[in-house]
């Protein structure tokens, strides 16, 4: 049983070379339980300015980050919490690229970490859906299926959660992984079959 920790970051935009992290949420978990009492959440002061669009998405305002610590002030604690864990995320490109860019700009070194990406798992499941003979003969493509976090959770009957909040999105990803494993895998599934 590999120790897992769900991670989500909220950012000032989508370009890790130009935008920065404004909040980080971590939720320790195993496939059979979520340790929400050990969850961590930080709001941090980004080095890039908050734009109106990003404030609209995640709701973190200039007044909230004005006196928040820079990421480098929580870095030791953050890295200590994730050390030894496989991270669970929904869309690993965001978390990997933003954490790597933030570390390179602060300490001159990047970071690589193993990830179970619930979005990628969902994409694999929907790409693997067989098409009927009639659909193949007629050249019909399979229906488009959203693999966004909220839509993926809805397919498993999981409740709606507040989107674009690092803590609740980390928890939402943890719950989604548990549902995906329960429906499509077994607790004995090798980690190498689901991680990137």
Image: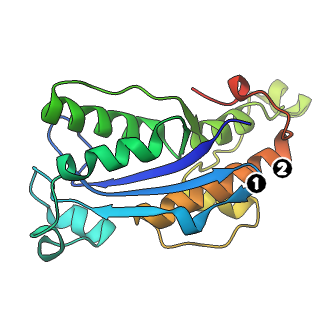
* Residue drawn where x is 63% and y is 41% of the image: 3
User: Does residue 141 appear in the picture of this structure?
Assistant: no
Mark 2 touches mark 1? (CB < 8 Å): yes
Can you tell which mark lies on residue 61?
none
Q: Quarter holding the C terminus? A: top right
Q: Is residue 196 above or below residue 180?
A: above
Q: Secondary structure at mark 2?
A: helix
Residue 85 horizontal/vertical position (percent): 55, 38
* Side (left or right) of 103 relative to 92: left
User: Does residue 105 appear in the picture of this structure?
Assistant: yes
Can you tell which mark lies on residue 179?
1
Q: Which is nearer the eye, 66 or 163?
A: 66
Residue 193 horizontal/vertical position (percent): 73, 25
For label 2, the crowd category at 10 Å Cα-Cα, with few meaning under 14, some 14 to 19 and many 20 or more, is some
Circle count: 2
Q: Is residue 141 above or below residue 55?
A: above
**What residue does disc 2 label?**
182
Instruction: Give the Cα separation between the discs numbered 2 and 1.
Output: 5 Å
Q: Is residue 24 above or below residue 58?
A: above
Q: Which is nearer the eye, 89 or 129?
A: 89
């Amino acid at each position: 049983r590999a120790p897992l920790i769900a991670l989500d970051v909220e950012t000032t935009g989508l370009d890790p070379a130009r935008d920065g992290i404004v909040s980080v949420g971590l939720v320790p978990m195993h496939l059979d339980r979520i340790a929400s009492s050990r969850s961590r959440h930080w709001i941090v002061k980004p080095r890039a300015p908050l734009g109106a669009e990003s404030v609209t998405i995640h709701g973190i305002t200039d007044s909230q980050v004005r006196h928040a610590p820079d990421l480098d002030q929580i870095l030791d604690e953050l890295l200590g919490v994730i050390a030894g864990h496989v991270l669970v995320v929904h869309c690993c490109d965001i978390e990997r690229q933003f954490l790597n860019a933030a570390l390179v700009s602060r300490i001159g070194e990047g970071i690589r970490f193993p990830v179970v990406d619930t979005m990628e798992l969902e994409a694999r499941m929907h790409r693997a859906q067989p098409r009927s003979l009639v659909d193949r003969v007629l050249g019909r493509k399979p229906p488009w299926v959203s693999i966004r976090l909220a839509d993926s959770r809805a397919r498993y009957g999981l409740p709606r959660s507040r989107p674009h909040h690092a803590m609740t999105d980390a928890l939402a990803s943890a719950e989604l992984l548990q549902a995906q494993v329960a429906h499509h895998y077994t607790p004995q599934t090798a980690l190498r079959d689901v991680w990137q």
